Every structure is written in C-alpha cells, then in structure tokens.
Image (spheres, rainbow, N blue to C red):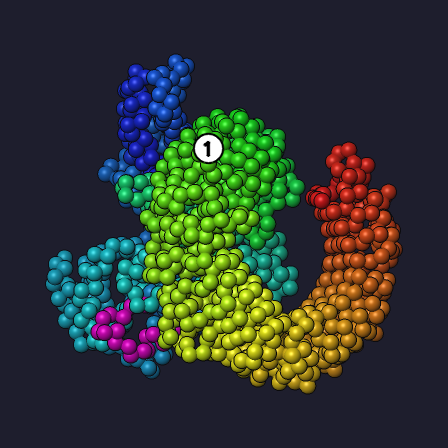
Amino acid sequence: MPVLETLGGALFGAVLQVLFNKLDSHQVLDYFRGRKLNEKLLKKLKRNLVSVKALVDDAEQKQFTDASVKAWLDDVRDVLLDTEDLLEEIDYEFSKTESEAESQTSASKVCDFESRIKDVLDDLDSLLDQKDDLGLKNVSGVGVGSGSGSKVSLKLPSTSLVVESVFYGRDDDKDMILNWLTSDTDNHNKISIFAIVGMGGMGKTTLAQHVYNNPRMEEEVKFDIKVWVCVSDDFDVLMLSKTILNKITKSKDDSGDDLEMVHGRLKEKLSGNKYLLVLDDVWNEDRDQWKALQTPLKYGAKGSKILVTTRSNKVASIVQSNKVHELKQLQEDHSWQVFAQHAFQDDYPKLNEQLKEIGIKIVEKCQGLPLALETVGCLLHTKPSVSQWVGVLECKIWELPIEDSKIIPALLLSYYHLPSYLKRCFAYCALFPKDHEFYKESLIQLWVAENFVQCSQQSNSQEEIGEQYFNDLLSRSFFQRSSREKCFVMHDLLNDLAKYVCGDICFRLEVDKPDSISKVRHFSFVPQYNQYFDVHGSLYHAKMLRTFMPMPAPASRIFTWGCTELVDELFSKFKFLRILSLFHCDLKEMPDSVGNLKHLRSLDLSNTLIKKLPDSTCFLCNLQVLKLNCCYRLEELPSNLHKLTNLRCLEFMHTKVRKMPMHFGKLKNLQVLSSFYVGKGTDNCSIQQLGELNLHGSLSIEELQNIVNPLDALAADLKNKTHLLDLRLEWNEDRNLDDSIKERQVLENLQPPRHLEKLSIRYYGGTQFPSWLSDNSLCNVLSLTLTNCKYFLCLPPLGLWPFLKELSVGGLDGIVSINADFYGSSSCSFTSLESLKFSRMKEWEEWECKGVTGAFPRLQRLSIVDCPKLKGHLPEQLCHLNYLKISGCEQLVPSALSAPDIHQLSLGDCGKLQIDHPTTLKELTIEGHNVEATLLEEIGRNYSCSNNNIPMHSCYDFLVNLTIIGGCDSLTTIHLDMFTILRELRIWECPNLQRISQGQAHNHLQRLSMGECPQLESLPEGMHVLLPSLQSLMVNDCPKVEMFPEGGLPSNLERIGLYCGSYKLMSLLKSALGGNHSLLILDIGGVVVECLPDEGVLPHSLLALEIRYCPDLKRLDYKGLCHHSSLKDLRLIDCPRLQCLPEEGLPKSISTLRIINCPLLKQRCREPEGEDWPKIAHIKHVLLHG
C-alpha cells in the first residue's frame, strides 16, 4: 500500500488559529496600548506566524524522508507553544488589572513581556531563514490547519473481487447483510441503504466483497445490475456518476463534464432495473453532495439496494442508511485463525509450540483488528526464528518498517481526514494508558482547560462544542463505548497512533521514552502502590509542563501515592501548568504558593487529606475546574471563592463541607455544581444564590429545612435550568419537623426543569407531594427515588410517566395501601419501567394489582424488602421479569406470580408467595426463617415459599448458582447430582446438614462454600476426581469436618479458605493437595492459636496468604514461612495481640504486606522508627491501617 505522505497540518493548524485569535483579541491589544508597549512587535509576530503557516504543509510532507525537516517542525511546534504561553500570560495580567482596578503593572513585568516577544521573534526569524536550506516552499491559499494543500498518496482502490478466500469470524455479519439484501421490503419505494461502519483495518471492504460474491445473491435475489465503486476521499459527484455509468455500460461514457447529461443517461440505465450498488470507503460528510449523487439512483426498480462502507457514523447518517451495522473486533479464536493463516500458511499443523506461545501474545496485542493480524502475520511468515518473533512482540506497531505494514497508512488516513481542531484533541489522548476507561465529560473538561475548544458562536458554550468534538471522534471510531456504563475506551492501536502523532509533547511515565524531556508539555503516570513521586528523576527539565495527571490502571483502583515533597516543587518549577491533578495523593496541606500558578485552569485534589484550601487559591483567576470529591477531612470552602469568576465546575461530594461561601451567586460561569447546602440565617448562603446560575448535569441541594420563606425556593429558579438533568433534594433527617405545610410549599417551589432525567427526594416531611409530581411536568424523567418521606400518605400517579425506567420507594412509613391511583390508568401504565424497588415500608399492607391490566409491560427487576405487613397482591403477569427479590415480607398471602423469563431469584421470609413456571432460572438465593414447606416443590415448574425444606427428588439441571443461607432445618443431605450445570454452591446456617453427596463428575462446579453447619461431617467424597473444575473452596465453622476426603483435593484448586473451627484441616492441607501446584491463595481466620503457621503446613505454590480474625495470635512462625519463595502477598488483619514479626524477618519474595487492625504490630512496623521496620524495608508495598 502506498505510504501516506502527510498528517495534513497535524497539531500546527489548531495552535496557529489559537495564536491568531489571541493576537486579535482586545485583551492583548488593550494591554499593549495601556502600557504603551510597542504594537509593532505584535504585527511582526503575526506576519511571522503567517509565514510559518505557509511552510508547514510542505514541511509535513517532507518530514518522513528528511530528518532535518522533522527537527525543524519540532522546533516550530515548541516556539508556537511558547508563544501561546506568553500571550496567555499577557491575557492573565490584563484580566488581573481589570478585576483589581489597577492602573499599572510593574515596569519589570512590562519589560519582561517585550523582551520575551523579541526572543520569540528571533526564534521565528531563525526558523524562517532555514527554509531555503531545507528546500521548503510556501503553500499559498491554504487555510490554517485545513490540510487542503497537503497531498496524500492515493490508497489502492478496492475491487469487487474477493482477495481472501477464507474469511474468519464474520459469518454472523455476513448473514445479517445477506438477509437484508435478499429481503423484499420495499421501504415505501425509497432506496434501501445499509452502512457497514468500523475503524480502519476492521475488514469492512473484505466483508462487502464476500457479500457481493456470495452464491445466495444469485439463488435468492437476482439483481439486474451489480456495481462496485471505490469512492475513497475524493467525493466528486460528476466523476462518481460517470464511474457508476461506465461500470453499468462496461464502456467509457462520452457525455463529457455535463452532469445533467450524465444523470440523464444513468437514470435511463437504472429505470425499471433492480440494482445493487456498493460504495466502498466513503468519507464524504456533505449532505448536499450525497443528495446530488442520489438523484438518478432513485429510479431503480423496487428492491434496489445500496451497500456503503465507511469509518464514520456521521457518513452513515448523511447517506440516510436504513440500517447501520458497526463492525466489532474479532473474537480471540477467530483472531488466532487470521493470524495463523498468514504467519504459518501451509505449515500451520506443524506449528512449533514455542512460536505458538509467542504468537498467542502477539494476537492479544492486535486486539481483534483483522488488518493488524494480517500485517503482523505476513511479516512473521518470513521470520522463522524465536528471537525474531520475540522482537516483533516487544516492539510497537509504529516501529515496524513502513513497507511491511498496512496498519500505519490505514490508521493515519483516518487521522488525516480530521479537522485540525480534532487532531489536537485526539493527540492529547496519548496521555491515556492502554485500555484506560474515561468519561466523556471529564475529557471535554480537559480539552476546554487546555484551550483546545474554540467558540466561534456565542450561543454555544465550550462544553457544548467540546461535546460535538467528542461525538465526532466517536462517530469516526477513534473512541469506542466501554462495557462499563457511560465509559469509553480507545483501541490500543489508536492509542499508539495518538502517541505517534503527538511525539514528545505527551509523556507517560514508564511507558514512553522521550528524546528530550524539555519538550514535554503533558505528563501522566499510573500510581503504583505506596509510590512516592520523584520530580528530579522524571520531569526536572520539563519546565514548560502544562499537564500533570495521575491515571488509574485499567480495571484497577488507583493507589495512594506520595507527593508531600513534590507539591512545593510543582508550584515553583512548573509555572505554565494548566491542568494539575493530585488525585489520591497523600497531601495533607495545600501550600499558599498554589496562587502563583497563573495559567492553571483545572485543579483536582480529590481523595486527598486536606482540611481546607489556602486563600491564595482564589487568586487563580483562570481556574475553570475545581474538584474536591472524597476529601473526607475538608471542612470548608474558601470565603472568597466568588473571585474565581471563570470557574465552570465545582465538585466537593463526600466532604465535611456543610456551608457555602457568601456571594456564591457571583460565579456566573459556573455550570457544574455537585452540591449546594442551604444556609441558615443572614450570615449564610441562601438558596436564592442559585437563581443566577445556569447549572448543567447533576445537582444535590441539601439542608432544605433551613429555608425560612418558601419564596426563597422559588427564587432558586430550578424550573428554568434547562440543562439540569439530575436533581437530588434532601432535608436533614435529624431535624424537628415543625411545619409540614411549609415543607410542602418549599418543595412545590423547587419544581425541576421539564427535561430532568433523574430525581431523588429524601427526608421530605410533608404529607403530600407537590403538584408537579402528579401532572405532566416531568414527563422526561427516567429515574425517580423517594426515600424516608415518612409522613406521605399516598403515592402520585407515577404510572403515567411515559419514560420512567427506574423507580425506588423506601421508608415511606405513612403508606398503608398502594391503589389504582398509583397507576394513573387501568389499561396502560408504567410502559417503560424496567426496575421497581420497595423497601422499609413498615405500614404497607395492600398492593392493589387486580383489575389493573397492561401494567409493567417491560419490568425486568422487582425487589420488595422489609415490608413486614404486606399481604398482597403482587402483579400476576410479568413477562419480561428476570430478577426478583422478596425478603422480610412474612405476611404475603398466596398469589401466583407468572415470570416466564426469570433468571435470578432471591427469597427470604416471603410468606406464601408462589411463582409459576420459572423455566429460565439460573441463580437462586434462599435465606431467612419463614419459608413454607412447598418451596421449590417440583423446581423448574412451580416455586412456592415454605420452610426451606427443599425437596431432594427433583432435577435442578438449569441452576448455575445456588445460595442457601439459614432456615433449612430439615435439610440433611445435598445431592450434587441433581445440579448438573451448577458453577457455584454456597450453603450457610443449615443446622442439620450432614453431608454433600455425589455419584458422578461435575465439570462445571467452580466455587464451593459452606459455613456454620455444625452437623456437616465431611466434604464431598471423591472430590479430587468428581469435581475437576473446582477453583475455590471455603469452609467456615464446620467443626465436625476434621479431614479432607480420601484421595485429596481437586488439582485445579486455586483458593482455599479455612475459618473458625476448621483449623484441624490446616495440618492435612499439604498432603491433601498432593502434587497439586495450582493453589495460589490461602485464607486462614478465626482460629484460636498463639502461633501461625506451623512448619511444613503451607503448600509451596502459594502466592498470597491471609490471616485474619485471630484474637489470640501473638507471633508468626518463621519456619512456617521461610521456605516459600513464591509468596508475594501477606495480609495480617484483625489480630489485636500480634506483637511482632519473626526475628529473622519475612521471605524476600514478599512484595506486598498489608497490616490492618493489628495495633501492636502496626507500631513496630512504622517507617523509620518502628522496631520491625528493618525487617520489612525491602518490601515494595507496605500498607499499615487501623
């Protein structure tokens, strides 16, 4: 594949546009004029920047073949960023003097600005003087950062011919498209269009080729005309129309450049004919051009189809696709097949095991991207040695020779097509670790803080434009939705692409190796356990640093890291910081010097130990984001917070702050506010302060009992805060309720905006809810929570809310009956509800469901907990219910609940409830002491509640998880043979259970846990053979289980827990494991001994040992630990008499030591004065807590 020659303006266009905007701003011009500075310097600076702009595109093309040009571009980038810092500093000084009504800035400051501008001009002059030596040419007529003057070598056009005869992992995708093609849906005589969307290299073209040539096309649907056109990035309506016409006629059209004539002939050829048109690799996002191309295509016969492949969801929308199919990464087994096909070809059956092991790791690295698998596979086919394969495994995809890789140009092509402002935003994501999950709002905040988001229209906020940027990148597959709710990720290769295009600007500690630290502007690191950050070793020369950000590792909690010494150095050395995050560090006090960070726009101190912020924080007039979440010791906000006039986001959830600073309403730019505490008295912040704020997103308003006059609540003007989506209203639960009428008036005046999606009301003291809960005012709400509103007598007609998906009602002690009013309609109510929870309803007796038809048609989850007086009746027909929990409802009368799709069922103290035909049940939990004798009678056909006397004569061949906790007094034996696909079994508090029996192998059971079963005599006999998949075994307080069964334990067992009365098993453990080296984790707890562990007891394969709840334990036996060279993790928890570590120390292999709630030992292990500290100083991660 030809090599892409340019990145199309890369980061330069966006930076240059920012600089031009700054130079034209009134702030910079007024500052110069007011201080009588030389305005000619600004004019010359602008001229030089224009000259640089004209050279950049040419330099971009030549940098790949000329190292000197690449170095020149790097120098240009650094000067441009320095210029941006300088102009922002001038902007800051102007804002500061304007706000403080100062007439003069110090003479030294003025001279410094002039001097620094002259330095920048000298640097630009020097760079421009080099253009002839480097052979750089001016490119005229090119907009800043447009990339329109750049040239990209044409990608080889695709054809309809199948290149790869064997096609792995796309059968379902292929069948879906073929079914669409062969369907006879007329779509109201409109063109039927199907779009295949996916990132570069995902196999869209290959999939389309296989569909185009599939035999089903001839057998099931006969197209009169079939045309394949490779569109690529040049969407010329005339040329495309002529290409389609030429392919139909199989000759060159002679209509010339007259579009009307071409379209006339195309219409003539298509009229009355059913056609299939494939438009491969479409980039055009101009709706008008598409409409123009579409005009003659409308004349095809009924059943005509257009198949489009594109990298952009936006393109799919513009072509008006009837169906959009996003192509996903290949599964692991299919990825291996693609890789093996190219790496081994005919030699696949003779595969060397060592190469296969390395190959599997290489396949993982490609993350299911077919083009990457093919490229690396082909590359390795010519490299037969193990060392060569290891070399490819350890290198980055961008380090492969470009002639060997199709991946680089494929992904760079996507980058090339981005506007310059999106290029800068995407490149910034090079700070993310691989597989990092991020939230859209957080990334947009970072872009805004870095000044990447430019507002051309006053009507849209920076956040709204930033959201457009984000959605554009998502549409083009640069981002992907994560499996975690509301999170996004980047494919590893796109993460590599971001790093590739940003160069040394972004630096990830212990991942990247920048050629020059001095060029680094953005820095991130993944905090390690108990890490202390060293500025001298990592960032000493990065004096122009703009971003300092810790980031949690993927699928991991972030560790606390040390920064006490770092903070002062950060503030004194890195004066150009825009984004500073000290998230989760051990900071106890914020120094006053924070006020010197004049460029700072985002400050995140979440999860630190600070008690207050210094007053100097309010000097940060550029600050836009201040996050203080989970600062559990934080007691107050600065009194002059209102001076942060540019503040857009303030978050302080889970702190001790209960008072808002005065004049809070002056923060006119504030959009995101996590919490607002209503003050009491004239010296406190009134809720009226919210009236002037245009808040977005989520807001919690608390201490509402402090509102004296209900009209103050009206002045908060919540109803008109149209961007507010999530609102929580809360009174103090410990207050004395003296006026329920006033509380209702307050709540009435706190009416939320019409577009609200989530509402929570807690500790409201009125007897009636406000009118806006009963009318149609909140028709867009998706989630409603009503908690501890104890005096409320009836629920509003929530069944009429058309979009309500989640409803949670708890602690409403005044509710005795829920009647037909709750539904609002007898024929159709709760049409969208998916989750319904009732809890702690002490007086609730009756739920009127009979006579109500069509309610809860989409309900999936129902939970009723701690409603002791509830008798009935539950809804009878819940066709989509898959989760049901009934607990603490002893008075339920017999009623048949039909839930044919139920998957999870949890029953405890549920009276005489009956559930009909739960044939899809997978997880069952039984607990409590009031479940009647017919429970699980003929399980699989009919459940009913009883005394938990589980019939042991049925087949439970559908259960995957079974948990029994208490109440099964008559249960003496559990026959595993009845649970043929069970994966997890937990049996607790069964006083008469004697044995767990089995007569055949159970290949599915992975986790077995039993506890507080005083009559249990033994573990399952023959479990070493009959439970081959068992990975986890827990035995707690089963005193009669004194030995392991004959034959020992299963060979795949990885974790064992022995607690309370099970210590006798410890001495037999090693022999029971035999030659098993799979045991990795051993938990010991609740044993009455003074010394642990005995010599020769622990298996040598252990990686982790936990000892907890041992009140008499005084010491650890070194001989029991010293021979365990594999032991990495030792946890000592809740052992109050444990005095010291062994005199000889701990095994050198231990890298993590946790000592929790062991006060005597904790004192001895403190650094550096503790007596036992020298014994553990070598351990990398030491946690002392409690």
Which residue is depicted at the point 27% across and 37% down? 139
Q: Per the image, is 321 magenta?
A: no
Front-most of 314 and 512? Answer: 314
The local crowd at label 1, few if under 14, some if 14 to 19, many if 20 or more residues have their Cα within 10 Å, is few
Which residue is depicted at the point 39% across and 66% down? 797
Image location of residue 1003, percent across then percent down: 67, 75
Q: Is residue 74 above or below residue 123?
A: below
Quick one: SS at disc 1?
loop
Front-most of 987 and 63? Answer: 987
Residue 147 visible in rendering:
no
Which quadrant would residue 578 be assigned to in this image?
top left
Q: Per the image, is 190 magenta?
A: yes
Image location of residue 378, percent across then percent down: 50, 60
Which quadrant would residue 906 be assigned to in this image?
bottom right
Residue 568 visible in rendering:
yes
Which residue is depicted at the point 58% across and 61% down? 360
Magenta segment: 175-194
Residue type pointed to by label 1: Asp
Q: Which residue is mark 1?
A: 683
Which quadrant would residue 1180 be assigned to in this image?
top right
Q: How many marks?
A: 1
Looking at the rendered image, the quarter that the C terminus falls into is: top right
